[in-house]
Image: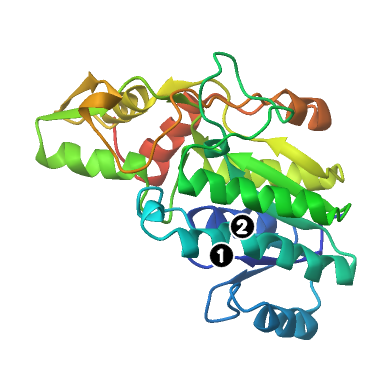
Amino acid sequence: MRIQDARVAILGGRTGLLGQALTKAFDQAGAQAFPLSRQDCDVLDPMSVEVWLDKNDPDLLINATGYTQVDLAEDEPEMAFALNGTVPPLLATLAARRAIPFVHYSTDFVFNGLKKTPYTEYDEPCASSVYGISKADGERGLLKLGYKRTLIIRISWLFGPGRTNFVKKILGLADVHKKLTVVNDQIGSPSYAPDIADNTVKLLEKDAAGLFHLANSGHTSWHGLANTAVMMANKNCIVSPIPTTAYPTKATRPHYSVLDLSKFTRTTGLTPRPWEDALKQYVMGDLGLGA
């Protein structure tokens, strides 16, 4: 689709980590972005979304909302399934009525992490947490609906400016602790929100639809991500590796959830930059830390 001058509705665009990055990316691409919050329209009330769509007539609808509290979801499954499972196909139905593209974001947590090689779009979801199961439920609902202009993008380990995230938390802890421990046996693909947003634009420019994996290139552990960030920021803190068993959580995390990005590269001709480069931009550019 032509992004220049397009009217883009971004649910979650006002306060969300990804939503804010999407708003900026579409503005920079020459589109007119409409960043929306719950005050503008509540995704749990499709009628309020429809009223907004009727009034503003966008050319593209993006859902960057969702229930993302992985451990809390174990105690609040109804809310997790409402936001992650029920809402996406309802929003896609609204987009279908208007014959406009619909973009939705899912997660690496739809996989159980038992593979030893990167997950492709053709691997069957097999989640082991309420959060992951609810996100997989949303994907299934969209695929069952079958609206041809739906783009589902699985992302993972999101960090970036505008909202608290794992990297920012670690750097804050490194200011007050001389030593931190972070798990080193969960391996995944870090994703820099502005890169995800820019590459979403690239997919839409190619009229991409269906299911895609998107992250930064390469992979690491949570310990590797934390330790690299602390070193980049020149924090006087030692980050030590520990196994998952030493840091029990309510929700089960996949031990391995690296995403295969080759479909994105085939479609756009682009290779996402390495996660280390993106992390450096975040730590030294966005946060203004380091040498």
Residue 264 visible here: yes
Label 2's element? Answer: helix
Residue 138 rendering spot, x and y as whole percentages: 65, 53
The structure residue drawn at horizontal position 53% and vertical position 68%, both measured from the top left corner, is 14
The structure residue drawn at horizontal position 56% and vertical position 63%, both measured from the top left corner, is 83
Cα gap from disc 1 to disc 2, whole angstroms = 6 Å
Residue 118 rendering spot, x and y as whole percentages: 60, 19
Q: Residue furthest top?
A: 116
The structure residue drawn at horizontal position 82% and vertical position 58%, both measured from the top left corner, is 101
Q: Identify the amino acid type marked 1.
A: Ala
| Frontmost residue, 172 versus 133 | 133
Question: Residue 47 sits in which quadrant?
Answer: bottom right
User: What residue is shown with label 2?
Assistant: 85
Residue 98 rendering spot, x and y as whole percentages: 88, 71
The structure residue drawn at horizontal position 82% and vertical position 57%, both measured from the top left corner, is 145
Q: Is residue 228 above or below residue 28?
A: above
Residue 32 visible here: no
- Which class describes the residues within 10 Å of circle 1: few (<14), some (14-19), or many (20+)? some
Q: Identify the amino acid type marked 2.
A: Gly
Q: Is residue 261 above or below residue 128?
A: above
Task: Name the side, left or right, on which 272 lies relative to 246.
Answer: right
Q: Is residue 99 above or below residue 182?
A: below
User: What residue is shown with label 1?
Assistant: 82
| Frontmost residue, 83 versus 21 | 83
